[in-house]
Image (cartoon, rainbow, N blue to C red):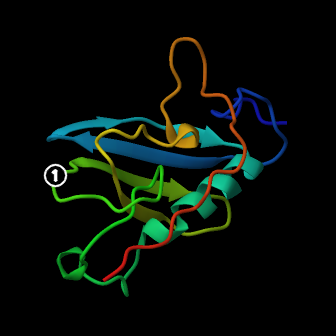
Amino acid sequence: MAYLPCAVGNHPFPGKSGTLYPAVSYLGDMHRWKLRLCPRHATIVEELLEPCEITDTSPPLAEQDSFPCLTCGGPTLADDRHMLFATSYFPKQERRDYWAMIHNSCPTPPLLQEPTEDGPPEPVGTLRVPPGPTG
């Protein structure tokens, strides 16, 4: 049994936790936080962010024409300035880095939101994973 609960749903869980460090940038302001995730929620978050992973073989961002919104999947516009950066440390995996655009009018996906004073965000089921960047 983990000593600290999962950041999604605030439930205890057996086994090792995964850690995600999301950061949201909006018009130059950066806000960062830490999420400790149970294995089930770590897998859901990993699937959500997989199309946004930055790897050695990722094409340069400047060469890509458009990026889907991480929250709704629609194409982002040149004036959208809401971005998510994240680094994950999940059990038995190497560090992974992610970058995604979010429409100015869309919220950060619920599973990636910072827990508030009222507690962690409630699980909302599996989110639709948007297609990867096109270019």
Residue 37 sits in which quadrant? top right
Where, by quadrant of the figure, is residue 26 drawn? top left
Q: How many marks?
A: 1
60 and 95: which is toward the camera: 60
Question: Position of 25 compared to 91: left or right?
Answer: left
Residue 16 can be seen in this image: no
What is the quadrant of residue 14 in the picture?
Answer: top right
Residue placed most toward the observer, 128 or 122: 128
Q: Count residues near mark 1 (Cα–Cα under 10 Å), then give few for <14, some for 14-19, many for 20+.
A: few
In this rendering, the answer to whether 122 lies above or below 15 is above
Q: From this viewpoint, is residue 43 visible?
A: yes
75 on left or right of 48? left
Q: Position of residue 127 (x, y in %)?
A: 63, 51
* Between 50 and 128, the one nearer to me in the picture: 128
Find residue 23 and report its horizontal and vertical position in percent: 35, 44
Q: Quadrant of the N terminus?
A: top right
In this rendering, position of residue 20 left or right of residue 32: right
Q: Position of residue 120 (x, y in %)?
A: 60, 25
**x and y percent of residue 48 in the render?**
57, 59
Residue at the outermost bottom position: 57
Left or right: 73 as drawn, with respect to 15:
left
For image coordinates 17% across by 59% down, the residue present is: 78
> In this figure, which residue is indicated by the disc labeled 1?
79
Q: Label 1's element?
A: loop
Q: Is residue 118 above or below residue 109?
A: above
Residue displayed at 44% across by 40% down: 108
Instruction: Please tell me which residue is depicted at 67% across the width and 28% down the height of the picture.
Output: 122
